[in-house]
Structure formats: structure tokens, C-alpha cells
Image (cartoon, rainbow, N blue to C red):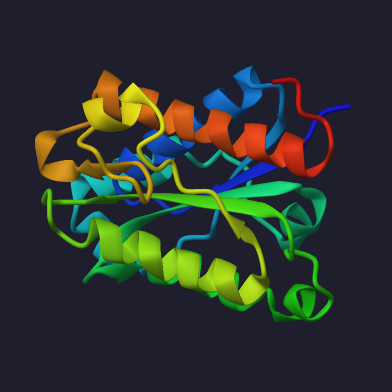
Amino acid sequence: MSVKVAVIYYSATGAVHQLAQAVAEGAEKAGAEVRLRRVPELAPDAAIDSNPAWRAHVDATGDVEVATLDDLEWADAYAFGSPTRFGNVAAQLKQYIDTSGGLWQRGVMADKPATAFTSAHNLHGGNESTLLALYNTFHHWGSVIVSPGFTDPAVYAAGGNPYGTAHPGANGAPGESVLEAARYQGRRLTKIAKRLKGLADD
């Protein structure tokens, strides 16, 4: 019997998508069944077309399944990813979260472990405040927040963010050290989910 992890994210130009893939990979290698889901794009085509990288990413990821509320009900654990928007969660992911009220009232997300990851253009462009904003949601859900902390060398190698994996987009695509930190975050989330379900193997 395995735990089920939903990796739900929004990505404009691809960095958060790559982090989401790495988190999912880490969770799978730790023995989880994983759903990798993107939330719907809300921006108009004119805005997307104004940035070639944005348009290219939208076109390249059309085959990634779109998140539904069923993914929250299905999962034993959650990993949410968002680029920073003025130090906060992107509207696309926030809109998805804002539809979860009915599940929240039924306690669907309560007692389930949850973690988050992000990317801002600059090293100090709002990464930590975006992660903390996502954790505010988890507090309201009654979820068990599973930040990476300083619990593995991979966290230090990726810049030392104990709140969650964060990538400065100005540096280009996430490098191997950042991707490994994201994989570790997925493994850690799965490990805690197993412990909470009485399935721990360590």
C-alpha cells in the first residue's frame, strides 16, 4: 500500500514546472503514487503572446492534466508550486485554491501533510513570502506543514531555503542542485505521509 501525492502547480515560463516534475520524481522514488497537475491558465492570449517564453511553455505543456478538486480528495499529501507575484501566490494557483471551500468544510485536507515550492526572478524576489503565503492556506486547511528545513545537504546546496525549494529565474533554468533539493522535498513529503498513515519503512 502506497501513499498518494498530488503535485499541483502553476508555471508561466517553465521553472516551476521543472520543480514540480522534480518534486513528483522524488515522491515516486520514495514509493508514492503521484498525480502531477497544472492549474488552468487565466491570462489572456495577448499577455501570453507578449512573452515568447510564456507562449512556448503554454504550448509545450498542453498535455499535462489540469488539476481538479478530485485531486485534493484523492491525495494523502500535497505539494503546491507557484511563481511569485509581487511576493505572493500567482492568481492562477490562488483561484484553484479558492474553489476548495467545500472540501475544507468537510475536512478533506485536514491532517494531510503539505509542502510548497516557488520561483521568483531574483534571489530575493519574494520566494519566502510566497511559500509562507501558501502555508497560510495549509494552516486554514488544518494540514500538517512539511517544510524541508535544514534536514539534508541538498537544501544547503540549493541556496539554503528551509521553507521550500526556491529558484531565482534570472539564473536561467533550474540547475541540478535546485532540482535535487526539489526531489528531496518530494521524498521528505512522502516519508512524512507514510508515517502519518502508519506505513513508515524507516
Give the residue drawn at x 68%, y 74%. Answer: 100
In x, y percent, where is residue 45?
A: 34, 63
- Taking the image as shown, residue 118 lies to the left or right of residue 33, namely left
Where 169 falls versus 201 (above or below)? Answer: below
Give the residue drawn at x 89%, y 27%. Answer: 1
In x, y percent, where is residue 168?
A: 17, 44
Give the residue drawn at x 24%, y 24%. Answer: 175
Where 101 falls versus 124 (above or below)? Answer: below
In x, y percent, where is residue 37?
A: 60, 46
Residue 14 is at least partly visible in this image:
no
State which quadrant residue 59 falls in: top left
In x, y percent, where is residue 150?
A: 35, 37
- Taking the image as shown, residue 161 lies to the left or right of residue 117, namely left
Where 12 falls versus 150 (above or below)? Answer: below
State which quadrant residue 151 falls in: top left
Give the residue drawn at x 11%, y 51%. Answer: 122
Q: Report the residue that reaches farthest toward the right.
A: 1
State which quadrant residue 73 falls in: bottom right
The C terminus is located in which quarter? top right
> Toward the viewer: 109 or 43?
109
Residue 156 is at least partly visible in this image:
yes
> Toward the viewer: 116 or 196?
196
Counting the numbered discs, the total is: 0
Where 197 falls versus 49 (above or below)? Answer: above
> Toward the viewer: 138 or 36?
138
